[in-house]
Amino acid sequence: MNDINWLPIVAALIGGGAAGAIITAIISTYRSRRQPIGRRIDIVPVFRQSNDSKSLRAKIAIAHENKINTFENLFLAEVQIVNRGNSDLQEFIFGVTLGKEDRCIFVETIAPDRHHNNIQTTLVTPDSPRSEIDFRLSPFNRGDSYALKMYVVIPADQMEPQEIKLGSPSPVKFIDMPTIVELLSNAALKVGPIRIGVGWP
């Protein structure tokens, strides 16, 4: 056994079918992994009550289809999702779930161009607000980005919307992308010895 020259045997295994099988297994594992979907959610207060005044109360009026609904607050939730995976998807179904008592009263869907469709499959109106809204994107190719503008109302004793969650029946995982505030907080302008930034100590 000690007289066997293992070097040609090992070289043959590496250069032959064994290496090919290993490479194929690695590629297969990579392709079958859960596809990452980037998400960014920014919350912008449009109107909310002031806690400083107990005697003066105001409401915001929303006109929709010749009817006016009033609410004590209104927030805009801007949602962006991006296909960060390595697969082109002909269709992608996902849903948005708001906090326990938060409600969406209107949704504006945004697609990158006329060849992409961002379809809201759950009816949402000021008369029929919802906390669970579903969407269908087609196609959802690598790098494609879609956006939603969701108008949200919350209970009067709540200061801001609760966490907004995204989910899908597809084998994907949602990964956080930096919000606009986080991007600005990390941005800085340097002019000579002076550095100007937002949220920079």
Image (cartoon, grey):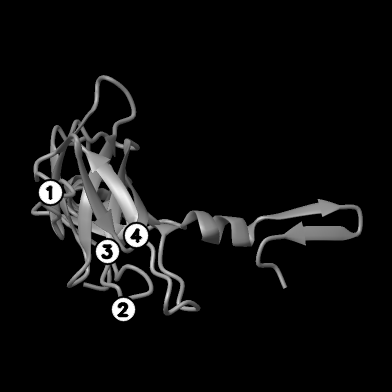
Residue 157, numbered label: 2
- Position of residue 48 in the picture relative to residue 116 (left or right): right
Q: Nearer the viewer, residue 109 or 60?
A: 60
The percent coordinates of residue 159 (x first, y second) are: 38, 74
| Quarter the N terminus occupies | bottom left
Residue at numbered disc 3: 164
Is 76 drawn above or below residue 83 in the view shown? below
* Amino acid bearing label 1: Asp
Q: Which of marks 1 and 2 is nearer the N terminus?
A: 1
Q: Quarter-wise, where is residue 89 in the image?
A: top left
Q: Earlier in the sequence, mark 3 or mark 2?
A: 2
Find the distance from the CA under tag 1 to the CA under tag 4. 29 Å
Q: How crowded is mark 3: few (under 14 residues within 10 Å), some or many (20 or more)?
A: some
Residue at numbered disc 4: 59
Query: Is label 4 in contact with label 3 (beta carbons under 8 Å)?
Result: no
**Which residue is depicted at the point 41% across and 58% down?**
47
The percent coordinates of residue 26 (x first, y second) are: 23, 53
Helix, strand or loop for disc 1: strand
Q: Residues within 10 Å of mark 1 (few under 14, many from 20)?
A: some
Q: Which of marks 4 and 3 is nearer the N terminus?
A: 4
Find the distance from the CA under tag 3 to the CA under tag 2. 18 Å
* Amino acid bearing label 4: Lys
Find the distance from the CA under tag 4 to the CA under tag 2. 14 Å
Query: Is label 1 in contact with label 4 (beta carbons under 8 Å)?
Result: no
* Amino acid bearing label 2: Asp
Q: Is residue 37 in view?
A: no
Q: Residue furthest top?
A: 114
- Position of residue 130 in the picture relative to residue 68 (left or right): left
Nearer the camera: disc 4 or disc 2: 4
